Amino acid sequence: MKHHFIDRYSNLESPIHKLNTTLKLFLAVALIITTVIQSQIPAYKFVLIFAVLLIALYTSHIPLTFFLKNLLIILPFACIGGLSILFANSGDLYSSFIGIKIYHQALMNFITILEKSIISIGTIILFVSTTRFDHILKSFQDIKVPSLIVALLSFIYRYVFLVIDEFMRTKMAIVARSSRQPTLTLWSYMISRSFFGSLERGEQIFQSMKARGYNGTIKTLNNENFTTGDGIILFLCLILYALLWKL
Amino acid sequence: MEALIKIENLCVKYEEKVALDGIDLIINEGEKIGIIGPNGAGKSTLLLAIKGLIKFTGKISFPGIRRSDVGLVFQNPDIQLFMPTVFDDVAFGPINQNLTETEVKVRVKESLEKVGLSGFEKRPPHHLSEGEKKKVAIATVLSMKPSVYLFDEPTTGLDPLSKYEITKILCSIDRTMLIATHDLELISKVTDRTIILNDGKLMAEGYTQDILTNKELLARNKLYPLEQLLKCR
Ligand SMILES: Nc1ncnc2c1ncn2[C@@H]1O[C@H](COP(=O)(O)OP(=O)(O)O)[C@@H](O)[C@H]1O
Ligand SMILES: [Mg+2]
């Protein structure tokens, strides 16, 4: 775990960080699901939800730039599928530009996908960066997600860091011995080296975890209780969600 | 003296390479034993086998203790330390031992005090210096209060001051321990008994004093240069 770019702010102290993990998980999933099942999202609702996310972000002391940067990095991946919808041939012509025709309905559909993606990804970034990963896993375990899946997730998480680590090490070793820019062959060699290297390291770290009593069950110190504060937040959020989607 | 660990005819094979070949060893309560040998002798393999982390043939029994009472400090602290903060790493073992929150916190505090790193709780382990990492690695095992400690190269690659401090920490641990190393100074200060491993075989066993003064034996096992280079400039 040498890099904390995914959850580098998850150790901060803020009201949002202190919320019960399972509650946070529930609220995040509920927001995503209720967003995704909408057939359309009017602009004012989108702005409203995004504002709610920003307020939560502000409360959690996470820099806005970090949030936006990650959002912009992930958004294109979510929208690749949406592109085909944008160029679909249906209904009235909206505009035509250097021979590319975009229809009104298609544009609306694309915008809806964009809105849904932004809300969902924003929610996930907010959740992940305000919750420690071991607490998320513990929460999965508590709500009876199969232990195999939880263990797999925990290893994927560790391996991501290991692979990046190993890649940087390999790259440094190679660059130190050559004066030229890495060629394509070299890049592919570096990448495969990083994977094998990190597999070996991952195995060693697993040994080290077993040596200190890890047997597949994640244990953390905070056996979080559901506090009154959590209850109030739950109540307020449920009202908010209901208002959002019923108005 | 009561035997805590009994090793009989221990053999370990990695694919084709025989890493350990018929090792017999008894570790008694309160003993501090040095395991010396050149690189690739099989020292780390022996410790991993005792802790039950690799496949082996032969027998390792634990009369009077359980295998979980054995604590292993890995050579590479980057493998030993995998949690986001020093506190979490030192607490990892005690939490897995199902201790209460208060007990865990006391254990973490005591262990960090013992290695001289009080106040490091919130630091991420991978941003520490090499010497500090080694000390945190020791603390992660101290906090579990094992009956037997296994140390793999605790001083290798450290500067003289860090070496001295780690040697002092090991001296202060009043428990049975095995130290795998080629740092002869360390074992002369900490251990009573020493074994020499070379190429997977147990070559010698005896009082540390006797082994370390037998230069010919050390030289034969690549632990001492046969000829002395006086000066080259
Ligand atoms: N995972 C492994 N796979 C294959 N060979 C290994 C592995 N680990 C160690 N070895 C080999 O086993 C021998 C003993 O290694 P090791 O116990 O690490 O020695 P030491 O700790 O004394 O330096 C060495 O020759 C080493 O190359
Ligand atoms: Mg070794």
Image: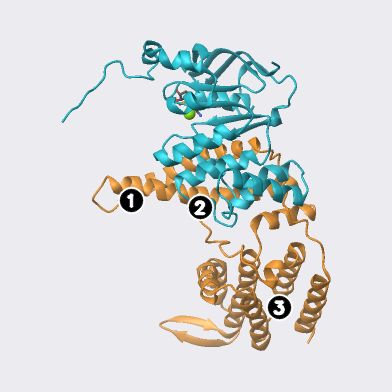
Q: Position of residue A25 (x, y in %)?
A: 73, 64
Q: Chain of mark 1?
A: A
Residue, disc 3? A39
Q: Are marks 1 and 3 on the same chain?
A: yes
Q: Nearer the viewer, residue B59 or A145?
A: B59
The amino acid sitting under disc 1 is Leu
Any mark on residue A184, and which? 1
Please say if A5 is above or below B28.
below
> For numbered disc 2, what is the local secondary structure?
loop
Q: Tell me which chain appears orange.
A: A
Q: Chain of mark 3?
A: A
Tell me which numbered mark, 1 or 3, is placed earlier along the sequence: 3
Tell me which numbered mark, 1 or 2, is placed earlier along the sequence: 2
Tell me which numbered mark, 3 or 2, is placed earlier along the sequence: 2
- Which residue lies at the image location 61% right of the left edge and 62% below the top edge? A11
Any mark on residue B67, and which? none
The amino acid sitting under disc 3 is Ser
Q: Label 3 vs label 2: CA separation?
A: 42 Å
Left or right: residue A60 versus residue A30 is left
> For numbered disc 3, what is the local secondary structure?
loop
Q: Are marks 1 and 2 on the same chain?
A: yes
Any mark on residue A2, and which? 2
Tag in front: 1 or 3: 1
